[in-house]
Image (cartoon, rainbow, N blue to C red):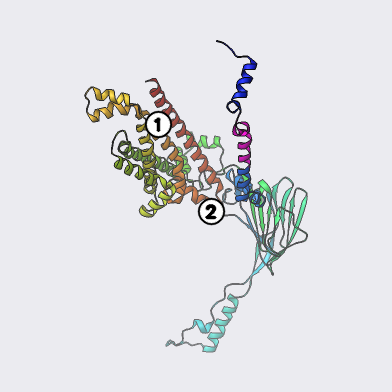
Amino acid sequence: MQTMNMNELEAIAARHSGILRRSVWQRFKVAFIAGGVILYLVFAWWFFSIGKVVSNANWSIAGSYLADWVSYEVRPDISIAEDGAMEITYPRFDPLGPNANPDWLKATRETVSRTAAAPAAPSAAAAAPAKSSSFSFMAPAATTAKADADAQEAIAPQVRQEEIVTQALVEMGTARTVEIMPDRVVLVRDGETVMLDLDGARDTVVATAALPDWAEQRQPGAKVVASFGMSGWVEIQADKVKVRKRFFGWENFFFDTNSAFFDKSLGEVAGLVFSGERLDPARSNLSLAWNDILYNPSWQHLDVWTKMLQTIVMAFIGTLFASMVAFPLSFIAARNILRNGFVNQLTKRFFDFQRSVDMLIWALFFTRAFGPGPLAGMSAIFFTDTGTLGKLYSEALENIDDKQREGVKSVGATPLAVQRFGVLPQVMPLFASQALYFWESNTRSATIIGAVGAGGIGLKLWEAMRTNQDWENVGYMVLLILIVVFIFDSISNALRSRLIGRRSTS
């Protein structure tokens, strides 16, 4: 091969300068693309007001929500009466159980004499009948006087001895305390001190100095909400202090406060289950423990697992029926299988109609038609995936190798046999792979459509989020969904890899 020297190359370049010269796009392609991306990002920043959203966002609230996913709260309320007596109460389903007495809440108690008025008794005139035919040896005046004396004695104030709380100290963490007195609350957080005066007569809370950024009072005299970060928060009103003390973990996850196994260690529970005396004569300790776990009222494990199973079945049935319907319709839509343009286009437009509307919208429609429940969710998945799978199947059929089909036809096979032996071996691995992928995807989608009433774990997840308190239950269900999706994703990937591998080796 003869090579050209540099002079010859320069001569050719001089004669044909346009051939060897790079265009403007080729020379500045990277700069154009980078500039376009930057301009788009600037436009998106301005159009969606991202800077304003970021600056106005309350990141502390977002952090509290995320912390609530992996923690639980103990919520004592400290009420302050008009005479200064305080009372500490806990919710009905408190994680600490009945007779809670945590070491982080120190209460000073005193026994005092308190005066309480008895319920007013009806007057003699009101209690006596208007007319009476009975005869009495006592004069009417004497009878009335005796009744009035009894009534006065009944409504006389009663003095009784009561144990009351006069002061409470709540430890919210290291160097973080809340001291509660009848007329004042003192907040301490990391060296900063806030004093709040309580005026029950005027129903006002007055700060003695400017509040720091971790304490908020929206208007003068209104309640004050103080945040202690991961430790929780406190709401101070004139006659009540609400404490929300946060602890890491999921309290009472297995046994609630009503269970016989409540507040027992793993070793104690194991000892009772395998060798302890029966706690319930009607059943074994193992059966009792399992029953207490399933029907735990705080976590509702059985109901959550049942709803998760509904979601899995909803995704499986919806995808299975969609595949079964899309399979024959795809042969009608494929132009190289059924050579009828009108029927092909009509079937494809039907697929477009089904998949053009999002699955969530179809779920709302079917929920309205069938009522809330898994049937609406299955119908939404079936209807949407029939259109999507039908389109994918028909495109796969249109891209098959006609040589194999022609070879089967050349031996005199019937049209049905041509499709069976000339078409299906080429597309079945792809069909199955796509159906498996949609089954895996629908396991996630079924959670979303369940939130609009289509049943399953999504509806229960939405109910827990609406309370704005049970975020640890939300975290539990989200973790369960992630585990299930991970398992089905692994199964689907393994099956699809096996199918594609078989196809590539055949």
In depth, the one of 438 and 274 nearer the eye is 438
Magenta residues: mostly which secondary structure?
Answer: helix
Local SS, label 1: helix
In depth, the one of 133 and 227 nearer the eye is 227
**Distance Cα–Cα, label 1 vs label 2:** 41 Å
Q: Is residue 310 left or right of residue 472?
A: left
User: Residue 232, position in %: x, y?
Assistant: 65, 49
**Magenta span:** 22-38
Tell how many labels. 2
Residue 139 seen anywhere in this rendered image of the structure: no
Residue 35 colored in magenta in the image: yes
Residue type, label 1: Ser
User: Residue 191, position in %: x, y?
Assistant: 78, 49
Q: Is residue 483 left or right of residue 20?
A: left
The quadrant of the rendering that contains the N terminus is top right
Residue assigned mark 1: 433
Q: Which mark is residue 342?
A: none
Q: Is residue 475 left or right of residue 169?
A: left
Dot 2 surroundings within 10 Å: few (below 14), some, or many (20 or more)? Answer: few
Residue 13 seen anywhere in this rendered image of the structure: yes
The residue depicted at 39 percent of the width and 35 percent of the height is 435
Residue assigned mark 2: 467
Residue 348 colored in magenta in the image: no
Q: Nearer the viewer, mark 1 or mark 2?
A: 1
Q: Is residue 15 left or right of residue 307?
A: right
User: Residue 192, position in %: x, y?
Assistant: 77, 51
In depth, the one of 302 and 108 nearer the eye is 302
In this view, 43 is above or below 390: below
The residue depicted at 78 percent of the width and 59 percent of the height is 209
